[in-house]
Amino acid sequence: MKIARTFLYLLLAATVEARAQSIIEQLDNALTFSAFDGSCRVRLSGLVDLEAYHLEQPAPALIDTDRHALFNPRLSLFLDAQFGSHVYAFAQSRVDRGFDPSDSGGRMRLDEYAVRVTPWDDGRFNVQAGKFSTVVGNWAPRHDSWENPFINAPLPYENPTGVWDSMVPEETYDLLQWSHVNATDKPQDVYADKYLRNPIIWGPSYATGMSVFGALGKFDYAAEIKNSALSSRPEAWNITDVGFSHPTYSGRLGWRPDEMWKFGISASVGPYLMPSAASTVPPGHGFGDYREILLGQDIRFAWHHFQLWAEFFEVRFDIPGIAHADTFSYYIEGRYQITPQFFAALRWNQQLFGSIRNDDNELQRWGRDAARIDIALGYRFTEYTQLKLQYSLLREDPAQNRYNNLFAVQFTLRF
Amino acid sequence: MRLPLFLPIVCVLLLIRTTCLADTVIEGHVTLPKSHAAPVMNKRYEIVTKNGVVATDPPRAVVYLEGKFSKPANLPVQQMAQKNLAFVTPLLAVQAGTKVEFPNLDDTFHNIFSYSPAKRFDLGRYRSDERPIPSQVFDVAGLVTLHCDIHEHMRGLILVLDTPHFTTSDTEGHYRLTGLPAGHYTLKAWVDSKTTKEQPVDLKSGGTLHLDFP
Ligand SMILES: [Cu+2]
């Protein structure tokens, strides 16, 4: 209790007191270590997020609770290390109630760790190995709570589809059941199996593997080989849990005609099943037949106080004997800095599902088409403290409760 | 008979002129804090060229004379440029009322902002060809800490002073303030955001005073 109170005081103080401000500045210096005449430097930094949700059931996206309110504190610790001028390493460790907002107990994870070698000064080529966010798209580089103008992720990164990674559907009926395309499904039914379902990209997708990337003039490129698919859950990102026998290949090509505009195209292909699904794979098929294939396009525009991002994903889940389950998802997001400290953001998201032949040989959509609007307001009290408020309205079709409202608030302390 | 009368006047005028020209100077040494370790760049999700080696400027002090001085009508425009993802001059001292320009000399965006009470601003994202060069007028005395919204490691300081008599020391801590008015003042040495040292000074016209801030 005492620790909690001190912590709360520190947070409050950090927002109002100049003294606490300078403590954070001092902390910044104290958390930078240097050895071998400065050629080896290490910096420890972090984010403390206190976030709360008021939500309707079934809990939207990847939020894991059957209640209407959720408090989700999170501590993220980052380590950045520079060894000479050619080797860089980083790590991210988190203490929270689960990778995605949930009502379970506290836990600690090592979410990211990687070593990067940069042989040439101009950045034309880098090679990186470890566990780190995907090169696909343009959201991963701005997904942390300080950079993200919203509290949640864009819809493609968190909207569950009817695809499970722990089991193969025996018939089309199973897939349609898992997708909850039946309008009479009650919210509790939809909630019950939610954590078995996979989105097309699971958050920043910190899977394990290797990447090469670099910038050549107005172009940049990135390619990676990872141990699990973009849709895979956090438990599948660890090499110790899933191994490397069914890798996913992804890449992105970027073009920057001038600093204002950035365009990118991405592609990814790889098996999406977890090893535990092996016993459900019918004879004559293997893991490699259950592939996720993704094509992506991304745009970023920035000028003065305005920033705009958009991403489009065309995804196919191969389910042999049942369907090519296709879906298209996109979002358009704008952020405007109204005053030096106050900003507003607006995001329009949609996910549309293709049709498959059901057991009666009729064409039927294999998921609930979803549209979501996100509105956020943010205020930076200092360089180290930020408050965000968000409202999201989700409409799903077909669904018993067509509309789902979400309110969220998040306070972040950066050090 | 005119000449003898004229001579003393010329002498007096000459005397006045030399006193005016004789510069009043304070010089000395400020003990500077140890250099901070160079910042470690957060390159987790970015391809940062230049290998992430950020040049760091060793600490310097700003020495200034405190007192009541009239403000000149036109203060020269100062610059605080950004190059190689760092401020070219990480510490700039200016007189209150000075306009400071923030040219971007890199081929990437910068977004300089400050939340310091002495001046809150956000220049937004701008390129090297941005015209007019983004600028701010610093009216209120105090320390302004500059950050970049894109490059977390970038730090710059503008010390806004209510006096025209100030100088920035060299990296050894040596300073020399010239052209000072005679009188009784306080000489201050700003060392960092937490440390400003001060000493009273009695300035006599044309004299050179030696003063150290240990
Ligand atoms: Cu910058």
Image (spheres, coloured by chain):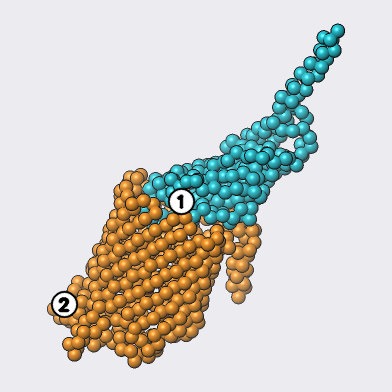
Q: Position of residue B74 (x, y in %)?
A: 64, 39
Q: In front here: A8 or B16?
A: B16
Q: Residue at x 28, y 87 (%)?
A: A177
Q: Residue at x 41, y 66 (%)?
A: A333
- Residues at marks 1 and 2, CA–CA distance in whole angstroms: 55 Å
B21 vs A362: above or below: above
The residue beneath circle 2 is A285
Pointer 1 chain: B
Q: Position of residue A386 (x, y in %)?
A: 54, 65
Colour of chain B, in one word, is: cyan
Q: Position of residue B87 (x, y in %)?
A: 50, 45
Q: Residue at x 67, y 40 (%)?
A: B73
Residue furthest out toward the top? B1
Q: Residues within 10 Å of mark 1 (few under 14, many from 20)?
A: many
Pointer 2 chain: A
Indicate if the residue with disc 2 has its beta carbon within 8 Å of ligand 1: no
Q: In front here: A215 or B209?
A: A215
Q: Residues within 10 Å of mark 2 (few under 14, many from 20)?
A: few
Q: In front here: A334 or A270?
A: A334
Chain (orange): A
Q: Inspect this view and state whether residue B191 appears.
A: no
The residue beneath circle 1 is B126
A54 vs B189: above or below: below
